[in-house]
Image (tube, rainbow, N blue to C red):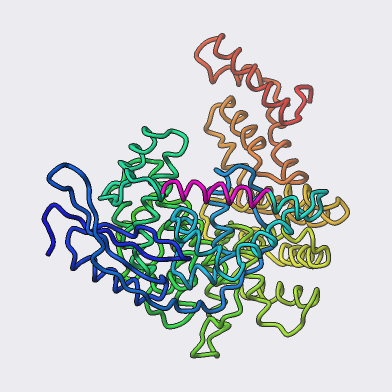
Amino acid sequence: MSNRRATFELQVLVAKNWTVRNLYDDEETAKQAAEQDLKSGRVEGVRILRLWKRADGEHAEKQVFEKMGAVKPLRDVRITPVESAPMCREEAEFLGHDSLALMARLFRKYLDETCLTPTEVLHVWREYQRIWDTESIVMAGVDRVALVQTRGSEMLPKTRGEEIYRAIEGIGARARRADRRKNLPRRIGTRFGVVLRDEDAADPFDGTFAATVVLARDLAERRDWLGKLDRLGELLAAETDAEARAILDSVAAQVFMSRDVLIDALGPRHNLAAAIEALLPLLAGGAPGFDAAMPRRETFVAGLKAGALPLLRATLVERCLKMVAGPGELSRFDPTREDACFRTLANRLIGPSAVVEGEAAALALLERAGTFVVEGGVTGRKRALDWLLMALDGAARRIALLRCLDAPLTHEPEVRGAAFEALRRTVEGAALADLAPGQGDPLAPLAVAADLSRWLARRFPPKAAQPVCAHLDALSAEHLVTHRVIERIDHPELALADRATRLLGFLLSGTLTEGRATDLARSRIRDHLKRPDFVEAFAAGFADAAACERGLRELHAMMTRAGISANV
């Protein structure tokens, strides 16, 4: 029989060590939790201690339940090779989000098998012990990271590996100390920030770690990903402390690094294209189309839209772009629509003026385009680029893609050369209005052409860039004349001072290509300067002599910047 003053402590046996799992107010609830842990196959045994305070004030305990079981063997939990890793030196860096994200990639199979995040593994002592006792995967992971981080340097992988081991062992020692603390809270309640502030006040050096231990224990009790999301959403909804929200954001991002969580969060989708489509609003600053059944959906959607969950957003964007780049069929059940799905996706990600998510999205689309061609190597890469360009609607989108790809293709000179040739052909085959489609402003295509011309001059040798820049200049000059742009700016009903200032401002705005287009604007300014009555006409636009003098000084300054001499 349970006493109302008694509590029941559930302990689990992991790696031959008994550790406290949780505290319960009644024996029956504790037994149900014990049986559930035992059925999971992740613990070797369970036991329950009845704790109470005797009449003399002394604390007493008695074991009321114990049961042993067989641990289910883990499936394949080998490490996933990585090709890059952040260089961490201090323990705080090893506990930072970038390092935890690396751990999530490196130990993906193990974490999915055990349904744990890196934060839980590093902060819950029994889980820390368990990963060390699992098929030497920690040693394999350290060896891989040390090898990657010492490539091209004088440091030996062994030396770097020893540094990593020291940091990991230091973190383990902190987890063990926290596990032994009797006064560490067993439950968070609704405000993680309260626990964080209390622990920071008690121990400024290790308070954040201890508070994260409390959070990790709370989450480790939930052996399914959606259960963890539900708890994290509950805590985020009530949290106002910035540091606490940052920790919760990091852990939520780690949960979504699991290969299955995003699928569950999005709910049933007809095909991969539909799943990607549901994620695209995120790339535009919104939130994914999470399934209505996703736990705490409103909390995560609101946080993503407000920019309050930057780490989670970055993780979801990365997952989305991996889906874009991956080999999976976009239209699995209707192969005839594969090309149409790709075209729709490409035109959603690549707009007339920019690529959503920049280089990462452009490269992901290029990888996806590679699945449509049979050739490999450089030839296949060029064919993939051609395929992607053909999928895009209009010259503006093609130019936006090619500009975005130029920097990442620096290490692929042959493909970069092919991209430049594609850009040249696109420009030569387009009208100026095609560079800024849908824009009613006649200055918009001029600005796009001028910006493209300057970019070409910066990125490519003069011999290659000059013909394209000259063509853009010719298009711009023709546009100025056809649309009477200069005449609209230099309106004859305006005062001469306003006309001259407007023309110079137009010339200095960067809207015009260098060459014939700028010459047309300069010529109109020079025509005004040649007027015999220029000074008198200019002065007529001012109320007094002092204002006129200031206006003349400003005019001369603008002329100097525009490269126009006062002596014409």
Do we see residue 341 in this rendering?
yes
Q: Magenta residues, as a range? A: 163-178
40, 263: nearer the viewer? 40
Q: Position of residue 246 (x, y in %)?
A: 43, 46
Q: Position of residue 404 (x, y in %)?
A: 66, 58
**Left or right placement of residue 395 versus residue 212 in this view:** right
- Of all residues shown, which one is farthest toward the right? 463
**Left or right placement of residue 457 versus residue 345 in this view:** right
| Image quarter of residue 488 | top right
Q: Residue at x 70, y 54 (%)?
A: 161
The vertical placement of 84 against 175, above or below, is below
Q: Residue at x 48, y 65 (%)?
A: 15
The vertical placement of 154 against 464, above or below, is above
**Left or right placement of residue 77 versus residue 42 in this view:** right
Do we see residue 308 in this rendering?
no
Q: Residue at x 35, y 37 (%)?
A: 197
Does the magenta-highlighted stretch encompass residue 211? no
221, 425: nearer the viewer? 221
Does the magenta-highlighted stretch encompass residue 169? yes
**What is the chief secondary structure element of the magenta stretch?**
helix
| Image quarter of residue 294 | bottom left
340, 39: nearer the viewer? 39
**Left or right placement of residue 245 versus residue 150 in this view:** left
Image quadrant containing the N terminus: bottom left
261, 102: nearer the viewer? 102
